[in-house]
Amino acid sequence: MAFAFLNADPQLSRTMPNRGATATAAEGSLSQARPTPLLSVLFLAFTALALLRVGLGPLLLDPVIDYTRESGSLAGKLHPALYGFAAILLVALPCFRVVLSRWEVRVVRALLAFNAGIVLILAVTALAGRGGSTGFLIDSYCGASFAILLFLFPAEWRPKVAQALLVWLALSAPVAIAEFVLKTRLLPFDETETAFRPTGFASHPLELGLWMAIGPAFTLATPWSRRMKLGLIGLFLAGLGVSGARTALVVGLSAVSFLALGAVGAQASPQRRLAFRLVAVGAGAALAPLCLIALAAVGALDRFLPGLDDANAQTRIDVYGVFSHMSAAQILFGIEPAAMLAIARTYFKLETIESPVVMFVALFGALGTAVFVTLFALVVRTMLRGAPGALVVGTGVYFLVALSSNGLSAKGSAVFLLFTLLIALHPPRRAPS
């Protein structure tokens, strides 16, 4: 796959047959290759694999392979979908020539830098005798870079991948509602919890909360009709209400309120827009108590009854106390995860590290974490360049919710999901006519 970096104004990226094909750019126009049957097959394969990557989580993989367990080979630590993505890349390399816009080039470069940083971090930790993070980083972060395979396909095809993923996430809502009513889960889940929380198609109640919280904002960025968008947003809000994920519920509802307020009077004059929004705020304030009563009546607010400073919330604060039992060298350069967990269990009675910050410092040290976070932030910032407000809000919700648990420091599809949605829903910039 040859990449032609355009100096003209960015436009849709195109995939062209490699045999005898050329990419030419003229001021204000670019040639568009006709999709081939092979390209269509690869697109369908990518969409299916993306759904498999998100839908097939640790709960279903662990009984079959050593996906999250300590034992087993590195090959078993990688999600099966990653091998499919690699196969698509190998098929496309000799067959297609890809023309990238400036934004796409920036995304590719940012991801290359990010993966180079991960390789450097893995090399340093391996030299220090700590190689336990290899499978996690390759699976969750390097594997997420396969989202750039979307650049193989015409820009008008890409939103269909995001739409397929959002439909899958939304389908978790009715499943979660049924689980909430019946107090039984569809997928096997053996963690002990003080109160029942549904999982839907997710691997954990907090992952379900993340899906439901980000769904509305990303749905607004799709080309669906208004009716379809409202229907899916309603499903996401219903699923969010029963998820039992408090941070996701607060952040998700706040984001929906913000987006709804921004849509009120968008086409009106500034004076009328202000009047419309004041009315909307008043109506929202009047309806809010009724919504709270309805949620409380069905038990969706039971998790809030102990307050926000209960034992679960306290563990997310206590976990930072492990730094007081680490030496300066361990904080700077990292520590064995098993040793970190031993500190958490001995001094704070914690069975898991539910903080990405603490886990990354344990794996990479403060210096390695600074490199990792900087490069990761660069990738996200690059993907958000020129993105509509709904994508920016959705990304903000994603990080606020994900950072409240161990979603970013555990094996899973969270990062791949974010990268794929941001690339698939990014609006193409057309050259001037």
Image: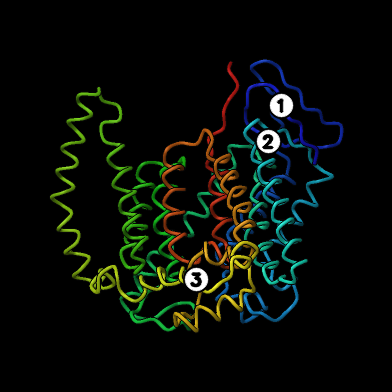
Measure how far apart labels 2 and 1 are at the Cα level: 9 Å
Task: Please state which amino acid type lies under the numbered disc 2.
Answer: Val
Task: Please state which amino acid type lies under the numbered disc 1.
Answer: Leu
Residue beneath label 3, please?
324
Q: Residues within 10 Å of mark 1 (few under 14, many from 20)?
A: some
The residue drawn where x is 49% and y is 71% is 324
Q: With 98 as the anchor, is 423 left or right in this view? A: left
Q: Is residue 188 visible?
A: no
Front-most of 249 and 22?
Answer: 249
The numbered mark, 3 or 2, whose residue comes first in the sequence reads: 2
**Is 65 drawn above or below residue 100 in the view shown?**
below
The residue drawn where x is 42% and y is 53% is 215
**Label drawn at residue 147:** none
Query: Would you say the residues marked 2 and 1 are in contact, meaning their CB atoms lie under 8 Å apart?
Result: yes
Q: Residues within 10 Å of mark 2 (few under 14, many from 20)?
A: some
Q: Which of marks 3 and 2 is in front?
A: 3
Give the image quarter of residue 308.
bottom left
Residue beneath label 2, please?
105
The residue drawn where x is 61% and y is 78% is 338
Q: Residue furthest front?
A: 328
Front-most of 249 and 379?
Answer: 379
Give the image quarter of residue 28.
top right
Residue beneath label 1, please?
6
Q: Which residue lies furthest to the right in this view?
A: 20
Front-most of 325 and 69?
Answer: 325
Measure how far apart labels 3 and 1 are at the Cα level: 52 Å
Which quadrant would the N terminus be assigned to in this image? top right
Q: Check the image and tell me how it is coloured.
A: rainbow
